[in-house]
Amino acid sequence: MPSDYAKSLGARLRSIRQQQGLSLQGVEEKSNGRWKAVVVGSYERGDRAVTVSRLAELADFYRVPVGELLPDGPAPRQEATSKIVLDLERLYDGAKEDLASVARYARAIQQQRGDYNGRVLSIRAVDLQALAVFYDCTPTELIERLADHGVLVADPRAFFAS
């Protein structure tokens, strides 16, 4: 009788396969027979133990990190970041090469929103996460980089009071 962990692992494997639009037979065909439908199915049911090396090979086949196949795999890196506010004048006028991508992204957001006040722009957490991926860092590390360059507005209300 499969353990709860084996069942959970199998459910993750099935979920990933189905997300990719593959049937068990489709896995066998796409892998040119490397992965037999009956074997993958037995992994998914939890009837057959999968070795670490075979799990790594299956992850490679599905093009996902191994941790994504594990039932208690790594949770997505979530950080408690909310929106930030950029000083557009400093970003556009004094932006170093290091922040050129942030400046392009900010211009794209301005276009998308039709927001051309020219002084500040709020960047939502989801936009910050996307930029952090581009810079290969966490959102918190990107915020630190932006602060180091002096383009963050700490208190937007005070910014407009001056």
Image (cartoon, grey):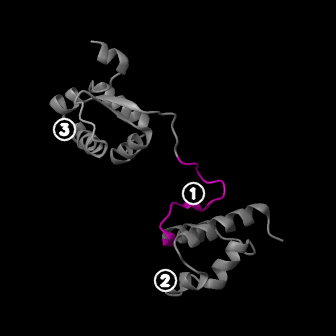
Identify the secondary structure beneath mark 3: helix
Query: Could you tell me which residue is drawn at 61 percent across and 54 percent down?
Result: 73
Left or right: 66, with 90 as reference point: right
- Reading the image, the residue beneath label 1 is 67
View extreme (front): residue: 114
Residue 97 sits above or below residue 3 on the image: above
Q: Mark 3 = which residue?
A: 97
**Nearest the eye: 85 or 160:** 160
Q: Amino acid at mark 2?
A: Lys
Task: Tell me the quarter of the image containing the C terminus.
Answer: top left
Q: Quadrant of residue 83?
A: top left
Q: Nearer the viewer, mark 1 or mark 3?
A: 3
Judged left or right of residue 137, residue 150 is left
| Among the two numbered marks 1 and 2 on one chain, the one whose residue lies closer to the N terminus | 2
Q: Position of residue 17 (x, y in %)?
A: 57, 72
Q: Residue 55 in the image: state x and y as whole percent.
A: 59, 68
Q: Which residues are magenta?
A: 61-76
Give the residue type at disc 3.
Glu
* Residue holding disc 2: 30
Q: CA distance from mark 3 to mark 2?
A: 44 Å
Residue 14: x percent and y percent? 63, 71
Relative to 152, say whether 159 is above or below: above
Asked if the residues shown at circle 1 and circle 2 are in contact, with their CB atoms under 8 angstroms apart, the answer is no
Q: Earlier in the sequence, mark 3 or mark 2?
A: 2
- N-term mark: 1 or 3: 1
Q: Is residue 103 above or below residue 59?
A: above
Q: Residue at x 27, y 24 (%)?
A: 150
